Amino acid sequence: MSEQTRETAAPTADDVTAQIGRAFPGGRFTVERWLAWLLADAALEQPDASAPDGAGDELAHPLLAWTAATQAMGVTWDELFAWFGASADDGPMFGEHETVWHAPMRVGRTYLVSGEITSADRKAGRSGVFDVIGYAFRLHDAGSGAHVADCWNSLILPRRSS
Amino acid sequence: MSERPEHGVAAFPGAVARRGEPVTPGMRLPEWEVAEVGAEKMKTTAALLRDPTPIHWDTAALRELGMGDRAINQGPLNMAYVMNMLAGFAGGHDRVRRLRVRFRGTVRAGDRLRAGGVVTGVRTRKDEPGGETLCDCDIELSVVDGDTVLTGTATVALPEEGSDDE
């Protein structure tokens, strides 16, 4: 991967800012039991801790909100990085994250995901030049239409060649 | 797969928030520890999330980048540990209403972690009749004997008086 060469010029600050407002294609995500189990296990939570609570399908780990959002945003991570002229090899990092849950995530439910780029700022620090990209998602229950969660994130893209 | 390190809460037998002292600002949240961050969980997570970033699973790529030889944990997993801590405090994952975090450092395979926090406020939700009681907190995740890697704020719904969670 380090031998890859880039023919394209590094994006300017204006190129990055031009992405603000760009909508994700979006999509739908069904919380399948096997995935909910494996994700809870990876998160070091007892998968069977999500016992039925009498209010419908059994609870899933709340991390499923972010998972559903990013899995159904309609582009791959590499494609998202490419919107900003970056790639996974540049070492993209999480900056900040916020999820607001209006209802618990549940196994078996299908969620509709929509979202957009909310901010893009070029900054310089001790580690060099980097872009901070803000993006937000909304999750709605595909069955009831209920607004289930909002996720906001910021992504840091190092600009090693800037 | 059946082996599980000693950590975390079991199946939320009851909310810590209602077992003893009243919940008031300044109260410390019960800590939640990860005995040892495992590289295998990162590989599972990378597959589940379709995360192409090699620093989570390819130690050769890490070395090539000059980033050592211990895989770097996914940020969402670090957030999940804090969610687990909040769920143990409030009595279930469905009681976690909001979490905002800033990623301040990296967690690597083999690290021992501790999630904790402090209550900053208790209020009644006013946008619905008989609104639930919400607890605002400052939260953090730290490497034991190391750096704080995640800080932020959170809101959980406290169990009602007389509920099964007491």
Image: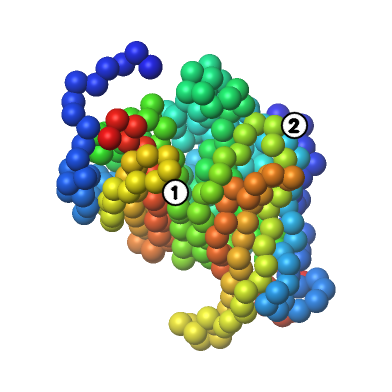
Give residue A71's quadrant in the image: top left
Task: Report how many numbered discs are placed on residues in the image.
Answer: 2
Please name the residue shown 21% across and 49% down the image.
A17
Secondary element under disc 1, as helix, strand or loop, is: strand
User: Which residue is painted at 21% across and 37% down in the image?
Assistant: A11
* Quadrant of the drawing holding the C terminus of chain A: top left
The N terminus of chain A - image quarter: top left
Looking at numbered disc 2 in the image, what kind of residue is underneath it? Ser
Task: Residue at 62%, 56% (x, y): give it.
Answer: B140
Mark 1 Cα shell of 10 Å, populated few (<14), some (14-19), many (≥20): some
Which residue, given by chain and number where applicable, does mark 1 sit on? A95
Q: Residues within 10 Å of mark 2 (few under 14, many from 20)?
A: few
Above/below status of A147 relative to A27: below
Mark 2 = which residue? B2
Q: Indicate the amino acid at tag 1.
A: Gly
Q: Chain of mark 1?
A: A
- Left/right placement of residue A63 relative to residue A90 reads right
